[in-house]
Image (spheres, rainbow, N blue to C red):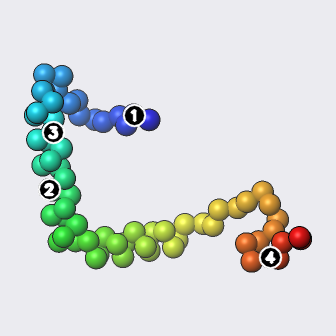
Amino acid sequence: MRHTLKHHIPDYWTADVALCFVGFLDRLATAVWDQHGPAMSDLLDSQLSHEPEQQTDDDTALDDELPF
């Protein structure tokens, strides 16, 4: 699966430049999580708890006893 971006990644980048950029993004993501991680986790938890439950085609609930 390929993600589409609004911005074009330059074709002239070398593998070294691309690796440096990915390293920068990794350090940036780590810094953001270090500073805002607990609040972001709480936000993600609240968003997940508000999602509707997925319906299954099977009428048996997970807690129901199996027929065998």
Q: Residue at coordinates 44% horizontally, 35% vertically from top-left?
A: 1
State if disc 4 and disc 3 touch (CB < 8 Å): no
Q: Which residue is mark 4?
A: 64
Q: Which residue type carries mark 3?
A: Leu
State if disc 3 and disc 1 touch (CB < 8 Å): no
Name the image quarter holding residue 27: bottom left
Name the image quarter holding residue 60: bottom right
State if disc 2 and disc 1 touch (CB < 8 Å): no
State if disc 3 and disc 2 touch (CB < 8 Å): no
Q: Which residue is mark 2?
A: 27
Answer above or below: position of 48 versus 25.
below
Q: Which residue is mark 1?
A: 2
Marks 4 and 1, how far apart at CA: 40 Å
Q: Which residue type carries mark 2?
A: Arg
Q: Decide which of tag 4 and tag 2 comes sooner along the chain.
A: 2
Give percent across and percent down for residue 3.
Answer: 37, 37
Marks 1 and 3, how far apart at CA: 19 Å
Q: Which residue is mark 3?
A: 19
